[in-house]
């Protein structure tokens, strides 16, 4: 029974990866990920910075670098857009 389930799962994965809409799905997934995990946090940081409640420049750079690093990870996980 386990071999049948494993074979079925392998067939599903192969079909999913060879789907004609895979590229558009990955692009949409990447855009949503960037919006949720990078654009919204950067907007929040910008509002915080504009309000004048910032600490030293080093902390500001560190906060921005963390969000940018997260964005890089989101794009790298979506990279197989081919």
Image: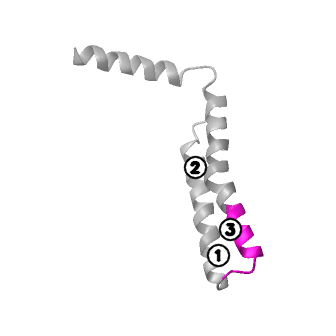
Determine whether the residue tagged by mark 3 lies in a helix, strand or loop.
helix
Residue count near mark 3 (Cα–Cα under 10 Å), binned few <14, some 14–19, many ≥20: some
Give the farthest residue toward the left. 1
Give yes or no for contact between labels 2 and 3 (Cβ–Cβ under 8 Å).
no
Residue count near mark 1 (Cα–Cα under 10 Å), binned few <14, some 14–19, many ≥20: few
Q: Is residue 43 magenta?
A: yes
Q: Quadrant of the N terminus?
A: top left
Q: Which residue is mark 3?
A: 45
The disc at residue 74 is 2
Determine whether the residue tagged by mark 2 lies in a helix, strand or loop.
helix
Label 3 to label 1: alpha-carbon separation:
11 Å
The earlier-in-sequence mark between 2 and 1 is 1
Q: Is residue 46 magenta?
A: yes
Give the image location of residue 63, x and y in percent: 61, 71
Q: Which residue is mark 1?
A: 61
Residue occupying the point 28% across, 13% down: 4
Residue occupying the point 61% across, 38% down: 29
Label 2 to label 3: alpha-carbon separation:
19 Å
Label 2 to label 1: alpha-carbon separation:
20 Å
Q: Is residue 28 left or right of residue 52?
A: left
């Amino acid at each position: 029974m386990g071999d049948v389930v494993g074979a079925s799962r392998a067939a599903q994965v192969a079909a999913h990866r060879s789907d004609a809409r895979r590229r558009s799905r990955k692009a949409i997934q990447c855009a949503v990920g960037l919006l949720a995990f990078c654009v919204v946090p950067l907007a929040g940081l910008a509002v915080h910075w504009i309000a004048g409640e910032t600490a030293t420049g080093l902390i500001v750079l560190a906060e921005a670098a963390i969000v940018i690093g997260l964005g890089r990870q989101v794009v790298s996980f979506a990279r197989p857009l081919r």
